[in-house]
Image (cartoon, rainbow, N blue to C red):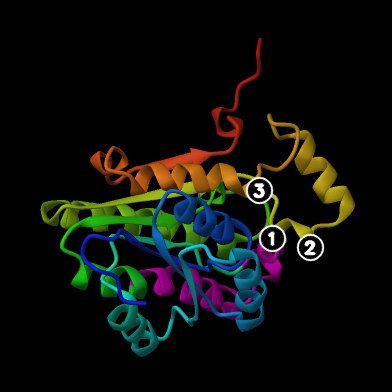
Amino acid sequence: MRCSPEVKTALVTGGARGIGAAITATLADAGWRVVAADIDARAIDKAERDWGDAPITGAVLDVTDRIAVSGLMDAHGPFDVVVNNAAIPADMLPFAELTPEHFAQALKINVQGSFIVAQEAARRMAAGAIVNIASRGYLGGIGGAHYVASKAAVVGMTRAMAVELRWRGISVNAVAPGMVETRMIEGFSSAMREKMTEMEPEGGPLDPAVIAGVVAYLASPAGRSMTGQVLLVDGGKTIGTGLY
C-alpha cells in the first residue's frame, strides 16, 4: 500500500493484538490508512479477518531488523504517524532471579526496536507524530526490573527525540498505560491478578480502547502541539492518594 500525499497514513507496530490492535482499529475508524505490523503472522491473519474492508494493511515485521524496517518504510510510507507499540511482556521475577538474558531481550525489543522504527520513520517524515508506548511500570515496582528499565529507557528516549525533532515539525510523546486487559496479564496467577485489581481505581484493568483513544489524540493536529510528554493512563492510580 503506497498512499497519495493527501491520505493520512499511520504505522502501528505490534498492531495485530491487544493495545496495538485497538490503536489500529481506532485510527482506521478515524479515517487513517493504517499499516499494522506484527512479528506474529498468525495474529495478522486472524486480525485481517476482523478488519474486513477497513483501510488496514497487515505486515509481518521484526522491529529489531533494520533492513526489514527500512523496506517496510519504503514500501508503505512515508508515514504521518508512527506508533511504537511492539514490546515483550514482563516476566514477573524477583530481582535476584533475573539474568543478563532477561535484560538483553527486554532492551533489544522494547528499546532498540522502538529506536530503529522511530529513526527510520523520522528520516522519511516531513512532519508528523511519533508515539511510543511506555508503561506505568517505568516508575518502578516489585518484580520485572528488566521490564521497568526498558520502559524507563523508552521514556528517556522519547524526551530526547522530542528535543531534536520538534524543529522539523515532528512531535514525540509517550503513553504509559497502567493495568490493561491484554495478554500481558493473562499469565498472572489468579491471586496476583486479584490483588492488582483491588488496587485499580477503575475496579479492574482498563480496556485497550482507552489507550487507543489517547494515542489517536496525540496523532491529531491538536495533539501534535504537545511534545516530549509522558501521559500516564491508569485511572488515577499513580496519583497515590486516597479520598481522605
Q: Quadrant of the N terminus?
A: bottom left
Mark 2, secondary structure of its residue: loop
Residue in front for this viewpoint, 112 or 54: 54
User: Which residue is at a point 57% across and 62% down the rendered structure image?
Assistant: 147
Tell me the distance, in whole angstroms, between the alpha carbons under discs 2 and 3: 13 Å
> Hey, which residue is sitting farthest bottom in the picture?
67
Q: Name the mark on residue 221.
A: none
Q: Are marks 2 and 3 in contact (CB under 8 Å)?
A: no
93 relative position to 234: left or right: right
- Magenta residue check for 48: no
Crowd class of label 3 (few under 14; some 14 to 19; many from 20; radius 10 Å):
many
Disc 2 to disc 1: CB gap under 8 Å: yes
The 10 Å Cα crowd at callout 1, few under 14, some 14 to 19, many 20 or more, is: some
Q: Residue at x 27, y 75 (%)?
A: 120
Residue farthest to the right?
A: 190
Residue 197 vs residue 227: left or right?
A: right
Magenta segment, principal secondary structure? helix
Type of amino acid at the residue the image marks with label 2: Gly
Residue 210 lies, in percent from the top left, at 57, 42
Asked if residue 207 is positioned above or below residue 134 in the image, the reply reads: above
The mark lying in front, picked from 2 and 3, is: 3
- The residue indicated by pointer 3 is 180
Name the element at disc 3.
loop
Magenta range is: 89-115
Q: As rendered, which of 32 and 126 lies closer to the eye?
A: 32
Q: Position of residue 191 (x, y in %)?
A: 88, 49
Residue receiving disc 2:
187
* Farthest-out residue, front: 53
Residue picked out by circle 1: 184
Please rate how many residues cluster around mark 2, counting C-alpha atoms within 10 Å: few if below 14, some from 14 to 19, many from 20: some
Q: Confirm whether residue 213 shows in the render.
A: yes
